[in-house]
Image: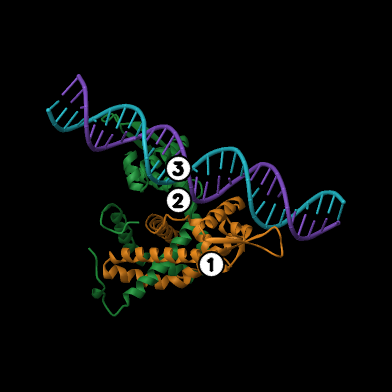
Chain colours: A green, B orange, C purple, D cyan
Amino acid sequence: MEYTQQSVPRGTDTSATREEVAEALEQLAFLAVRHLTNRDISFTAASTLGRLSREGPSRLTALAADEGVTQPSMTQLIQRLERQGLVTRVDDPHDGRVVLVAITDAGRELLAERRRGRTDRLAELLATLSPEDQEALATAVRAATPAFQRLVENAGRARKAPGSTAS
Amino acid sequence: MEYTQQSVPRGTDTSATREEVAEALEQLAFLAVRHLTNRDISFTAASTLGRLSREGPSRLTALAADEGVTQPSMTQLIQRLERQGLVTRVDDPHDGRVVLVAITDAGRELLAERRRGRTDRLAELLATLSPEDQEALATAVRAATPAFQRLVENAGRARKAPGSTAS
DNA sequence: GGTCCTTATATAGGAGCATGATACAAATGT
DNA sequence: ACATTTGTATCATGCTCCTATATAAGGACC
């Protein structure tokens, strides 16, 4: 599943390239966290809500595993989200131990608002650039998206599979 | 300093582009927080250390303002960092009220380690991609870097200047 | 049916990181 | 001298994470 450097097309200095890409991605990530982050709920909270929105009602333990936090943390998080009316808990009729967590309409609305906020702030930032720069960024993003999608996918798999240098 | 959309070259649907870019940045932030984050110190702590490294000894209040947290938060943060030996406090001879915070060698070493860790993990991730995908990412990054640098600069200015929708 | 193990969730206690309100000392303006 | 502003610290509170432990339901086995 891992590609070696020798198969790179034409004399591209791959290690320098990775440095470059790593550097750029790092800066991008910093920007994203710095300027595109809402302070209203935590990262894990938002991510959990998003997951509940995409995948439907889930068990506490499954959520904790997926989000990479401990089960007690998820219990507390869900309690807070429930207090805020963003999720509800339903007992599983088939198993008296489990609690199914589901997103509410208010939760979906919060997700939508956060999304709008991020897009708006990004629009403000992009508006400070020249049309040429905007065009350059747009082109680059379009070109990079497929590869980047796969990168994110692989990162997700690395989390769950053993044997990798998971931090 | 702001450009309007009418001057964009050829029929680029700017709003759709922004959606795309926003989507990409969102995923990037997710990747960064999920897979590139060290758990040793917080984001604000790391960012503050980086600032101290770049800009030299600074006042508590200045740090708080630059990092976008309140002064009490910064006081606590500096106390923790001091306990960990990453920064030191020096009294300002010119003003008996101020405390100058400076990074220590241990602090610099921590920054370097964190940087190495992130780069290594990114390299691991990049290595899971096909040579074609790696090439695509590298090309996109090179094409986007100049515009992106300006974007980051503008974002930094926007934080300090009033009149914008600061989060 | 009772004992044992596993699974699912909750609780308790502790640390980090943020907040607003407030205290206090040093500097500054009148 | 006195009032005000400025720079830090402290306090009380809340969110978010952790580890360790408790409770309770489900299943296996004798």
Residue B69 location, x and y as percent?
57, 53
Q: Are marks 1 and 2 on the same chain?
A: no
Identify the chain of the residue marked 1, using the numbered disc in the image. Answer: B
Residue A125 location, x and y as percent?
52, 62
Amino acid type shown at disc 1: Ser
The residue tagged 3 is A109
| Quarter of the figure that contains the C terminus of chain A | bottom left
The residue tagged 2 is A115
Out of A136 and B13, give the one closest to the viewer: A136
- Which of the numbered marks, if any, corresponds to residue B53? 1
What distance separates the C-alpha of mark 1 from that of mark 2? 34 Å
Residue drawn at x 42%, y 68% as measured from the top left: A24
What distance separates the C-alpha of mark 1 from that of mark 3? 41 Å
Residue B27 location, x and y as percent?
39, 57
Kindly give the residue lying farthest to the bottom in the view shown: A11
Badge 3 marks a residue whose secondary structure is helix
Badge 2 marks a residue whose secondary structure is helix
Residue drawn at x 28%, y 52% as measured from the top left: A160
Q: Is residue B125 left or right of residue B111?
A: left
Mark 1 or mark 3: which is in front?
A: 1
What is the quadrant of residue A109 in the picture? Answer: top left
